[in-house]
Image (tube, helix red, strand yellow):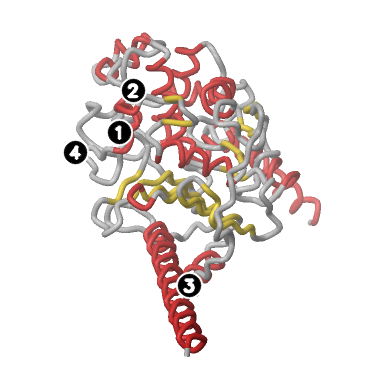
């Protein structure tokens, strides 16, 4: 009897495995193997060793100067609770290019390489600007078919441009979904051949008419940058950004088994180096006397489209709040927030998959972080002013007392 039961279980297991393989979900076995061997069962900010990667080399590393108020400003309980609730791993603030505050949680430090997730999409847009400056790409309006001619044979694909990919108006048959293992995004994270997945993704409508966030657009954009430059994304990012900005640490960009970077995500860098990217954009591409990306292109990156007033070239926007800001946004709560009027950059990384969003799909946490930081800085300034007035008043009384 027991023999028959085990035989039945084996038969059903074999049938299940065969069904998974034949259905194109064999990547699930890879996902299970990687996660059981090297970490948790879900994507994490600490995934830099789970996959193959290319090194993003730095040169002559230089850290930010510390602000005179470094780690001395008290922040509200609201902000602290938000960091704890969303399992933050790092929280860093720059003011006028100096480190005002930094803290690391859950065994992380300033040396920890943290997963960018979709913040990498904004980095791709930066690289497009660099490729235009290098005259390797004519403009953001260049056709995708100039790089991959098969798109010219498609009634929708022949109209597809790099701008469509950066603004998430590609018109692909792709549903962005992260919450179940059979989703295209789950497959994208573990698949062995990202290019194959991209080129097998069909188009369903004319590009440029509708915003729909699709990670396949970013992966295609990464393949285009590789083809245009003749370099890996990691090497080009090293050449154009990591070395000139004198990043503190080498970074890693995860790849598939074919050596193609996961362009839609997965740059692993320190919080301080992510902050340098934010500072570069805040300074409109200007760094240490040099224009690293054309100012015109940076302004285009930050300008929301007509189709989505909260999204530019893979950079999110909020112009409705009192303090206007822009931000890079990655899965599970990774942010580089730029508040231009106050010359502030905020970096926050974490591990939380239940972030609440507004009607434009912007995480509410970004607004909370920005407003609480600004409120705390304003309160600190007011307290400092009151102390200064009290000291002046005391000094004046001492002078009167001495003279009498």
Mark 3 vs 2, N-terminal side: 3
Q: Residue at x 46, y 33 (%)?
A: 123
Nearer the N terminus, badge 1 or badge 4? 1
- Residue shown at 35%/40% (left/top)? 213
The residue where tag 4 is placed is 306
The residue carrying mark 2 is: 162
Q: Position of residue 90 (x, y in %)?
A: 59, 55
- What is the spatial separation of the Cα atoms under label 1 and label 4, in whole angstroms? 15 Å
Write down the residue under mark 3.
76
Mark found first going from the N terminus, 2 or 4: 2
Residue 170: give x, y in percent of width and height.
Answer: 31, 29
C-alpha separation, residue under disc 3 versus residue under disc 1: 33 Å
Q: Residues within 10 Å of mark 1 (few under 14, many from 20)?
A: some
Q: Secondary structure at mark 4?
A: loop
- Residue 58, placed above or below residue 389: above
Residue carrying label 1: 299
Instruction: Tell me if 50 is positioned left or right of 358 in this view.
Output: right
Mark 4 and mark 3: Cα distance apart in space: 36 Å
Q: Earlier in the sequence, mark 4 or mark 3?
A: 3
């Amino acid at each position: 009897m027991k023999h028959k039961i085990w035989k039945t279980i084996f038969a059903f297991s074999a049938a299940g495995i065969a069904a998974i393989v034949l259905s194109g979900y064999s990547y699930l076995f890879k996902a299970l193997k990687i996660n059981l061997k090297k970490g948790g069962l879900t994507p994490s900010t600490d995934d830099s060793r789970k996959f193959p990667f290319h090194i993003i080399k730095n040169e002559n590393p230089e850290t930010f100067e510390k602000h005179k108020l470094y780690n001395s400003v008290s922040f509200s309980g609201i902000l602290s609770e938000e960091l704890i609730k969303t399992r933050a791993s790092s929280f860093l603030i720059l003011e006028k290019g100096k480190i005002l505050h930094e803290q690391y949680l859950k065994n992380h430090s300033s040396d920890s390489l943290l997963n960018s997730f979709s913040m990498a999409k904004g980095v791709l847009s930066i690289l497009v600007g660099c490729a235009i400056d290098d005259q390797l790409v004519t403009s953001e309006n260049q056709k995708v078919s100039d790089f991959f001619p098969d798109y010219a044979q498609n009634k929708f694909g022949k109209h597809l441009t790099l701008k469509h990919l950066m603004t998430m108006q590609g018109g692909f048959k792709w549903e962005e979904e992260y919450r179940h293992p059979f989703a295209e995004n789950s497959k994208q994270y573990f698949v062995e051949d990202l290019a194959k997945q991209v080129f097998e993704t069909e188009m369903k409508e004319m590009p440029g008419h509708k915003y729909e966030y699709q990670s396949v657009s970013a992966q295609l954009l990464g393949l285009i940058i590789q083809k245009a430059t003749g370099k890996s994304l990691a090497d080009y990012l090293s050449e154009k950004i990591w070395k000139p900005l004198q990043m503190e640490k080498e970074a890693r960009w995860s790849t598939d088994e074919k050596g193609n970077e996961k362009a839609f995500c997965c740059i692993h860098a320190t919080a301080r180096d992510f902050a340098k990217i934010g500072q570069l954009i805040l300074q409109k591409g200007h760094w240490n006397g040099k224009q690293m990306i054309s100012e015109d292109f940076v302004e285009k990156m930050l300008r929301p489209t007509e189709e989505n007033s909260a999204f530019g070239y893979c950079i999110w926007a909020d112009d409705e709040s009192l303090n206007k800001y822009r931000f890079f946004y990655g899965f599970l709560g990774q942010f580089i927030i730029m508040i231009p009027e106050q010359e502030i950059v905020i970096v926050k990384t974490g591990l939380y998959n239940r972030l609440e969003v507004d009607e434009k799909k912007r995480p509410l946490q970004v607004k909370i972080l920005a407003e609480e930081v600004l409120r705390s800085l304003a309160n600190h300034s007011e307290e400092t002013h009151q102390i200064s007035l009290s000291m002046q008043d005391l000094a004046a009384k001492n002078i009167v007392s001495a003279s009498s």
